[in-house]
Image: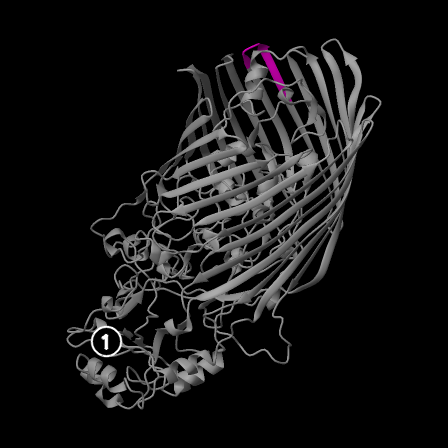
Amino acid sequence: MKLKTIARCIALIGMSAGASGWVQAQEQPAPSPQRVEITGSSIKRIASEGALPIEVITRKQLEAAGIVTAEQFIANLNINGNGSDNLASNADVTSGAQRGNNGASSANLRGQGADSTLVLLNGRRVATHGMKGSAVDLNSIPMAAVERIEVLKDGASAIYGTDAIGGVINFILRKNYNGLEAQAFTDISQQGGGNIKRMSIVGGFGDLENDHYNVLLTATHSENDALRGDQRDFVNTFQPNRGLSVDTRGTPNATVFATSLANTILSNKSNSGPVFPGTTQVMNAINVLNLPGGAGCSAVDGMAAYDAKLWDVASSKYACAWDTGRAAVLQQPVKNDNFVARATFKIGTHQLFAEAVGSQVEVSKRFSPNQVSPGTNFPASSFYPSTGSAYNDVFNAIVAVFPSIEANRGAPIAYRWRCMECGNREISTRTEAGRLQLGADGQIGKWDYRVGLSRAYSESESKLGTGYNYTVALANALGTGIINPFLKPGEKQSQAALDLINSTSAAGVTLYGGKTTLTQADAALSGEIWQLPAGAVMAAVGTDLRKEEYTFNGDARASSVRPAILNAPFDDSNALPKVSRDIRAVYAEVLVPVLKSLEVTVAGRQDHYSGFGSTFNPKVSFRYTPTDTLLFRGSYNTGFRAPSFNQLFNGITDSPYAGKDLADPATCPTLKVDSSKPGCAAITPNILTGGKTTLGPEKAKQATVGVVWAPSSNFSANADIWEIRKENSITTIDLTTMLQNYDLFRDQFLRDSTGALAFVDQRWVNAGSSITRGVEVGAKANGAIFNGKWAAGLDGSYLLEKKSRPMANAPYGESEVGRFTFTGDLGLRWKHTAFVNYTQGDWTGTFTQIYRAGYKDQVLPGVQNGLVMPSNYNPNVKAYIIYNMSVTYSGIKNLTLTAGLKNIFNTDPPFAITYDSNTGAGSSWEPRVADPRGRAFTLLANYKFK
């Protein structure tokens, strides 16, 4: 079959009929076209004939970019959304849907969510992450064995079933490899921390064509070192002049509090402290460092004055705060071991294979030390007694400014304290995953067939490390007065105090664990069914039988011996014995050449899920080439996503809202916290999250229309406009939306007998809908100059619309494009990757630009209600732009060396207000957008043994 001009261009740029943002390998002589199965279709065909937008990234392109993990690959993929799906976004305290996502990295194509993106390995499913059970953990992908990655930029439920709304990522491993090669890679940051290294070996023997068999073995070990917040200057949550400050008064030098629990030095069983002399303002939180004449909060590392105006809490004018953002890791430490073993046998036109893939991943999230606060966990018996060594110094400093408390001398001190000696909180997660796949494919007459049987699993377990202490034991220890929460700058705890703190440690306790298991049998048959004047009509039919199982364990300790651990995020309410469901599906696909220049493909799939019934999803696509240089393509399809086991069966989790930015929508129409206005004071209700067994599948309708122009073999350009409409979305409606639509969600705001807001129900529901629309564009050119070959290209994604409504009868909200959101997908208007590369002889050089647009920033309460206007305030987050380069040399026999420089200009992430006053997580940069490592040097060496 003779490839025309446009077909050559399509093949050159990676079967996507559009320019890839990845640096292209130099053009090689084209082999004879062979029929292959392309991601997104069950019909085998010549690769360049497809009508769907598919981007292909090869192993050499990944190596040139210095990418050795699937998470790095996803971060550089323009079509991928900017969700809370990477390890950096989950390195701190998490809440709601992010809980239980320890150690996982996920894909999020077109911003539809990790659970709406299908991830395949060699064209077949793998088990979802054992902890959460709703999305594949990319850390389990054996990247060193990957030959290429195919990214389908279109819905594919008509072919693959559930999860394929946003698109499909198919990791395709090496096959029929003969030889032995070893590879070593290092990626070292200039500023220290976050270094990456990988070692791998690949071996194979036998040739399918000559020996009729091939055996492939690969093994890889990789490590990502931790990058701490205090290792980067841009992590600074104390920037009130820019509208950012920390809302925590739990400090290494404790802040004294008034409380109704007991008589204390600030009050007699009252949450209101003393009145500042000469005013009517009560002071409920006081730190001796911040009093007039004091040493100042900044005398202790990481502390600064609490910004009472920015958070609109006038009663904390003399409090201090501590920067929790500097304590969290920006890059979680990861250790990853994986292997692939595959044996393939060729018998005539048939190939039989057995493949085993396995991985073990260890990830540790580390964040701020625990805060001790007066309350249920720390009653009056835990307050600092008058016998404590620091008592007189603290009391005398406060009474000098507030003489009215003299009568309380001798009463205990209630306080909020950051237990630095307890250590940063650490949760370590170990995940083991594997898949055994048996299969065969080949030809029977003119028909191609494929059959397979597999069993895959992913099992995770999280354990507590440092920073977690038994609550009662710690409270009793504090009540002795031996531990001093009021250390002055430069002072340290006594050895007796340290021993007492260490005796309460809960390190090593298993937090929770989960396991998913996937058993699958599949079969497909494709071939020509008849001839039309314009060509052969091709068809495929197939079946897919799956059993999905999930188990989630809560606290692993004996139920009779479970002493409470301070702020340990046990999920006992979500513990599930083994739950399962069976899926039976049949599908068909027909390709009809209507004209020589026009082909139409029709596909449909019927899925039956035990538990909630059946769903049918069709797809229609076309490919039209009116000239040799012009191609039009398009598709329309429906999709669906079945609810995950967690969404169906999780119990109710009750989490107190700790932020200071929430006002009661029933009494405060402006929804802006303003303590000077009746009914607009800050409130802290409890938030209810959890599953519902009545959930049904969410459904989607989507369409894509595109054009490719290739006037010569040296240039091509493409543009595809797409839209996805989701209905009956499975969602937890964010609190902001519920507040803004209070009349619609009045029943979810639960009140006590006095009418005060006590609970907000944010459990999973089928509600509302969303519209996401965008354009993907690309261009690529290549040529020859100075006895070498050059190539240049651009791949971009422009988000036209992203909006949602909480219920079907509600109006759509304002556009979410370019606007900050706490969780979920951050809708950046424009993203692109541009590259230039040049090859001459044994040398290849590349230069790449990565661009991520800016957006509207978060606004803290004091700015929102006009109480304060920071002097250097900018409501917009700047664009993030970095440049990378690499050089590859292959002039030494059997050895290839690639040296790279990432982030050439050492660009910091742009300033962004990501601090969440509810959880205390976040700081001054956005992990969903930027890489915190800064300039880094990479070196890859690949040696082939002969």
Residue at 47% from the left image edge and 34% from the top image edge = 64
Please rate how many residues cluster around mark 1, counting C-alpha atoms within 10 Å: few if below 14, some from 14 to 19, many from 20. Answer: many
Residue at 68% from the left image edge and 29% from the top image edge = 41
Q: Quadrant of the C terminus?
A: top right
Find the residue positioned furthest to the right.
445
Q: Name the residue under label 1.
A: 288
Provide the residue span drawn in magenta: 622-630
* As drawn, 269 above or below 686: below
* As drawn, 454 above or below 787: below
- Give residue 21's position: percent from left, percent from top: 47, 30
Is residue 501 rendered to the left or right of residue 515? left
- Give residue 562's position: percent from left, percent from top: 59, 78
Q: Is the magenta stretch mostly helix, strand or loop?
A: strand
Is residue 7 rendered to the left or right of residue 519? left
Q: In which quarter of the image is residue 180?
A: top right
Along the line of sight, which residue is nearer the eye, 309 or 17?
A: 17
* As drawn, 720 above or below 638: above
Along the line of sight, which residue is nearer the eye, 612 or 545?
A: 545
- Whether residue 542 is visible here, answered yes or no, is yes
- Give residue 250's position: percent from left, percent from top: 35, 70
Residue at 50% from the left image edge and 68% from the top image edge = 465
Q: Quadrant of the N terminus?
A: top right
Q: Which amino acid does label 1 sit on?
A: Val
Along the line of sight, which residue is nearer the eye, 216 or 240?
A: 216
- Whether residue 21 is visible here, answered yes or no, is no
